[in-house]
């Protein structure tokens, strides 16, 4: 729910489609905290340390200037690489779970021709109906309203170094920097300082209830900042406000939503997301190759990002951008940029 509030407040404040989400690498680290000596309260202390580091980073103005210098073709190539596994999901789903996936894909195709704006919402609605029909017991006994539980943090050096610092690094490198770059690729001022400081502060609030950090979204940002949200860029902030409101609603019915999603085939969920993001993927690829002298660097960025390679716990989006910048510096000297 905190990320929903952040989407609404900052999008209204800056009239920019600023979208936030929980940290995927943070969730992965959370799953591993059971092995921490002393228990989960040490992990909460480490999460608070990571949140404080995020706030400090947001107060460093050089970050926004650094991201602004990333060439647009590389930023959009990174976005295309992030999206690539998802846009393949409808193909895989049509082969592996045709009974569920094919009706969703056919409905989406029909509405893309007849009512383009409603194609994705209708596909999502049909997927939900199919899930309920095929496994109506998924919601039986599921709690409707969540009950937050406060966890008193314990600050222990081993946990702070072993969990807190890695969590900070992967959240910045794997979430915030790609998310800011996605917004920049669509021509927006991402307001990096405000976004990172406020999300870092809210991450601290989430931490004491066992929550992972809140950060700039990359995939969600591609939906709300792209032409699928609105043909007029100055109106796309409304999509982020709507996303924030949806987060709030889902937060209130988190128990039922989690039960439904956990009972579903992950491939079906990925397939619906892939259909929603297909237009964004096409636009990103087109933008990535529009400048001939930057195409090799953009291709390197896309391929490394799409590979899903993780090095030192940092995801492929960051490394794709690093490799692309290295190739760019080698092939196109700075004086020619």
Image (cartoon, grey):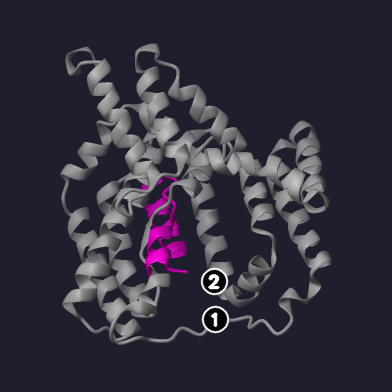
Q: Residue 137, which numbered label?
A: none
Q: Which residue is mark 2?
A: 251
Q: Note whether residue 186 is visible.
A: no
Q: Position of residue 337 (x, y in %)?
A: 24, 16
Q: Residues within 10 Å of mark 2 (few under 14, many from 20)?
A: many
Q: Nearer the viewer, residue 75 or 6?
A: 75
Residue 103 x/y as whole percent: 82, 47
Label 1: state its secondary structure.
loop
For residue 169, which quarter of the picture? Answer: bottom left
Say above or below: 98 vs 39: above
Magenta stretch, main secondary structure class: helix
Front-most of residues 44 and 247: 44
Residue depicted at x 32% and y 29%: 324
Q: Earlier in the sequence, mark 1 or mark 2?
A: 1
Q: Is residue 3 located in the magenta-colored stretch of the structure?
A: yes
Asked if the residue under mark 2 is in contact with the one under mark 1, i.e. CB atoms within 8 Å, the reply is yes
Per the image, the residue denoted by label 1 is 146
Among the 4 quarters of the image, the one containing residue 63: top left
The alpha-carbon separation of the residues under discs 1 and 2 comes to 8 Å
> Residue, x 17% and y 14% (percent of image)?
335
Residues 31 and 210: in front is 31
From the viewer's perspective, is 86 left or right of 58? right
Nearer the observer, 118 or 166: 166
Side of 35 relative to 249 (left or right): left
- 4 w.r.t. 179: above or below: below
Stretch of the chain drawn in magenta: 1-29
């Amino acid at each position: 729910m905190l990320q929903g509030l952040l989407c609404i407040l900052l999008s209204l404040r800056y009239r920019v489609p600023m979208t936030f989400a929980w940290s995927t690498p943070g969730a992965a680290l959370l799953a591993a905290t059971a092995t921490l000596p002393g228990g989960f309260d040490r992990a909460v202390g480490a999460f608070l340390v990571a949140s404080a580091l995020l706030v400090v980073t947001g107060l460093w103005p050089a970050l926004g200037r650094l991201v602004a210098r990333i060439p647009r073709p590389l930023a959009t190539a990174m976005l295309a690489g992030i999206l690539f596994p998802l846009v393949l999901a409808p193909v895989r789903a049509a082969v592996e779970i045709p009974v569920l996936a094919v009706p969703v894909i056919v409905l989406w195709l029909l509405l893309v021709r007849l009512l383009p704006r409603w194609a994705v919402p209708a596909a999502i609605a049909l997927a939900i109906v199919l899930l309920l029909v095929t496994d109506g017991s998924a919601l039986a006994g599921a709690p409707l309203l969540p009950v937050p539980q406060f966890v008193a943090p314990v600050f222990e050096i081993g946990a702070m170094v072993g969990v807190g610092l890695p969590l900070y690094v992967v959240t910045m490198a794997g979430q915030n920097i790609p998310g800011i770059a996605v917004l920049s690729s669509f021509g927006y001022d991402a307001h990096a300082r405000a976004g990172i400081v406020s999300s870092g502060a809210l991450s601290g609030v989430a931490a004491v209830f066992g929550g992972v950090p809140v950060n700039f979204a990359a995939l969600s940002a591609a939906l709300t900042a792209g032409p699928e949200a609105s043909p007029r860029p100055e109106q796309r902030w409304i999509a982020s406000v709507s996303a924030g409101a949806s987060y709030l609603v889902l937060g209130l019915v988190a128990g039922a939503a989690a039960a439904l999603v956990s009972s579903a085939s992950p491939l079906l969920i990925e397939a619906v997301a892939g259909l929603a993001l297909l237009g964004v993927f096409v636009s990103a690829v087109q933008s990535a190759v529009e400048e001939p002298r930057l195409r090799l660097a953009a291709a390197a960025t896309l391929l490394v990002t799409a590979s899903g390679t993780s090095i030192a716990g940092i995801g492929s989006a960051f490394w794709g951008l690093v490799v692309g910048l290295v190739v760019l510096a080698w092939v196109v000297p700075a004086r020619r940029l």
